[in-house]
Image (cartoon, rainbow, N blue to C red):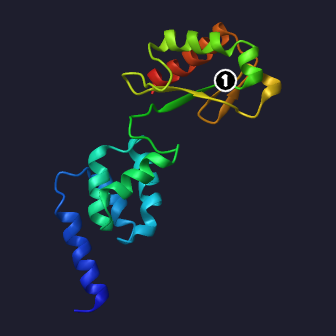
């Protein structure tokens, strides 16, 4: 049997031996050869699919790439973009840089947390929103500011921030 055929056969066995794994994860793994250099790309794709890295997928990726599970875990915890905790469909990033802090984003953050019923770093139970604190959005002239997904909102008050989130909640409920 040629080296490529043996590799394809062992890859197929590695995939079929994980019958309990989510089909989405299996599909992601099929896109990549079982080479450790693809670890970050695989984790990013899994994160995009699930909005976090389910712990059981770390073992699956470890087995597939034939690397120690600790290596997969180390990468999953090193990069800020990767998360072991479920994230919401939308991410609310409240800036706490100097300008935003001085202009009242502490109250904006408090109001958003109360409105959503979560603290910074948490996700709503319906997984609609994750509330996060960041230390610079790079838009100090708009302070206080927040970013929801890719949109930046500035010159916020607690009331204005809640209004923006309520509008988004309405759109989520309409889907």
**At 26% across and 85% down in the image, what residue appears?**
5
Residue 16 picture location, percent across and down: 18, 64
Where the C terminus falls, by quadrant?
A: top left
Residue 157 picture location, percent across and down: 69, 10
Residue 45 picture location, percent across and down: 44, 53
Locate residue 57 relative to residue 139 in the image: left or right.
left
Where the N terminus falls, by quadrant?
A: bottom left
Q: Is residue 150 above or below residue 37?
A: above
Q: Residue furthest right?
A: 141
Locate residue 118 relative to residue 166 in the image: left or right.
left
Question: Would you call the spot at circle 1 few (<14 residues within 10 Å), some (14-19), or many (20 or more)?
Answer: many
Q: Is residue 11 above or below residue 102?
A: below
**At 27% across and 92% down in the image, what residue appears?**
2
- Label 1 sits on residue: 96
Count of numbered circles on the image: 1
Nearest to the observer: residue 150 or residue 137: 137
Residue 91 picture location, percent across and down: 53, 31
Q: Quadrant of residue 144?
A: top right
Q: Is residue 4 above or below residue 98?
A: below
Q: Quadrant of residue 30?
A: bottom left
**At 23% across and 52% down in the image, what residue appears?**
21
Q: Residue furthest bottom?
A: 1
Q: Secondary structure at mark 1?
A: loop
């Amino acid at each position: 049997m040629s080296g490529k055929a043996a590799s394809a056969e062992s890859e197929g066995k590695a995939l079929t031996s994980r019958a309990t794994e989510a089909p989405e994860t299996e599909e992601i793994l099929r896109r990549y050869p079982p080479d450790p250099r693809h670890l970050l790309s695989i984790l990013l794709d899994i994160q995009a699919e699930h909005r976090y890295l389910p712990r059981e997928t770390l073992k699956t990726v470890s087995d597939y790439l034939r690397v120690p599970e600790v290596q997969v875990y180390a990468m999953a915890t090193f990069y800020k973009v990767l998360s072991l905790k479920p994230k919401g469909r939308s991410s609310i990033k409240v800036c706490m840089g100097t300008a935003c802090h001085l202009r009242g984003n502490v109250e904006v953050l408090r109001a958003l947390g109360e409105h959503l019923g979560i603290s910074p770093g948490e996700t709503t139970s319906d997984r609609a929103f994750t509330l996060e604190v960041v230390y610079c959005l790079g838009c100090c002239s708009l302070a206080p500011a927040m970013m929801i997904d890719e949109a930046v909102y500035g010159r916020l008050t607690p009331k204005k921030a809640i209004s923006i989130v309520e509008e988004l909640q309405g759109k989520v409920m309409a889907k």
